[in-house]
Structures are given as structure tokens and as C-alpha cells.
Amino acid sequence: MKVARTRYLNQNILFFLFIIISCQIAVNRANAKPVYLSAGESYIIKTQEEIDTVFVSAAAIADYELVGKNSIIVYAKQEGTAEFILFNQNNQPIKKSAVLVIIPLPPRIKEYKLNILKVTLKLTR
């Protein structure tokens, strides 16, 4: 009897995990990594589906121009964060992108920052 309970418990746990993972995939289907821009820079967002509507959370931070039916150009205006959500003709989200507009770094600081990130790790036993 104990074996049967354990089996059903394991099945319930697996089913619960499957539901959580499925929900997470459905929620994050349209999400993407954030894009970092400096004021005046631009970025192209392309989709497979035709874009019908674009939502911008903060047009003062970053705005967009529609280019064709499947892409937009996002351009940064001032420091801050803006989110772009692209919808198809059925009002379903196609793509979601966060744009972080940052203060541009001087060239020397950029070079220093890149050199810091190139770290070599050596493990010995």
C-alpha cells in the first residue's frame, strides 16, 4: 500500500511541475532579453507575423517607427526604461522587448569594462 501512495505522490508532483512549466512557457512566449541603448541609438525588432498594434510604456524614453509589416525601429530618447509589446491582428502578443536607455560611457571606461569581463578561470586538483 505504501508503494502505491508513493507512486501516486510522484505522479502528482510530476503533474504539478508540468503545469508550472507549461504556464511559465505560455507567459514568457513573447518575452525577450532587454535591449540596452544610449540616447540617439536605434534598434530593429523583427517578427514573423504581421504587426498590427504596438504598445509603448514610456514614449518619452523610447519611441518607434513602423518599417514594413513585420518590423519596427526603436529609437532611444532619454535615460530610463520603456517596454514595447507588439500585437498581431487578433490582438495576441507577438513579441515583448524592454529597452533600457543608459547614459553613454566614455570610450576608456567601455574598454576598461570589457577588459574586466575577460576573466580566465583555472581550476587544478
Image (cartoon, helix red, strand yellow):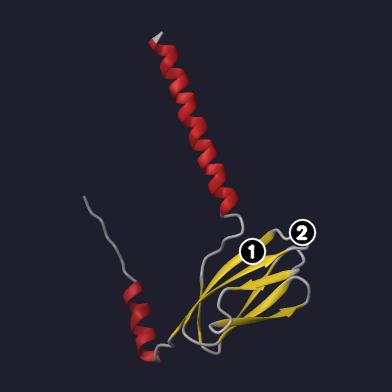
Q: Residue at x 42, y 15 (%)?
A: 5
Q: Residue at x 76, y 68 (%)?
A: 52
Q: Earlier in the sequence, mark 1 or mark 2?
A: 2
Q: Position of residue 83 (x, y in %)?
A: 56, 71
Q: Secondary structure at mark 1?
A: strand
Is residue 107 rendered to the left or right of residue 91? left
User: Residue 95: which disc?
Assistant: 1
Q: Amino acid at mark 2?
A: Asn
Above or below 38: residue 6 = above
Above or below 20: residue 125 = below
Q: Position of residue 70 (x, y in %)?
A: 75, 70
Q: Position of residue 90 (x, y in %)?
A: 77, 59
Which of 43 and 94 lies nearest the eye of the viewer?
94
Q: Amino acid at mark 1?
A: Lys
Is residue 63 rendered to the left or right of residue 117? right
Which quadrant, please, contains the N terminus? top left
Is residue 20 rendered to the left or right of residue 67? left
Q: Residue at x 59, y 81 (%)?
A: 59
How crowded pointer 1 is (Cα within 10 Å; few <14, some 14-19, many 20+) is rated as many
Q: According to the image, label 2 marks what residue?
A: 90
Q: Residue at x 70, y 66 (%)?
A: 47
Q: Position of residue 86 (x, y in %)?
A: 67, 67
Q: Secondary structure at mark 2?
A: loop
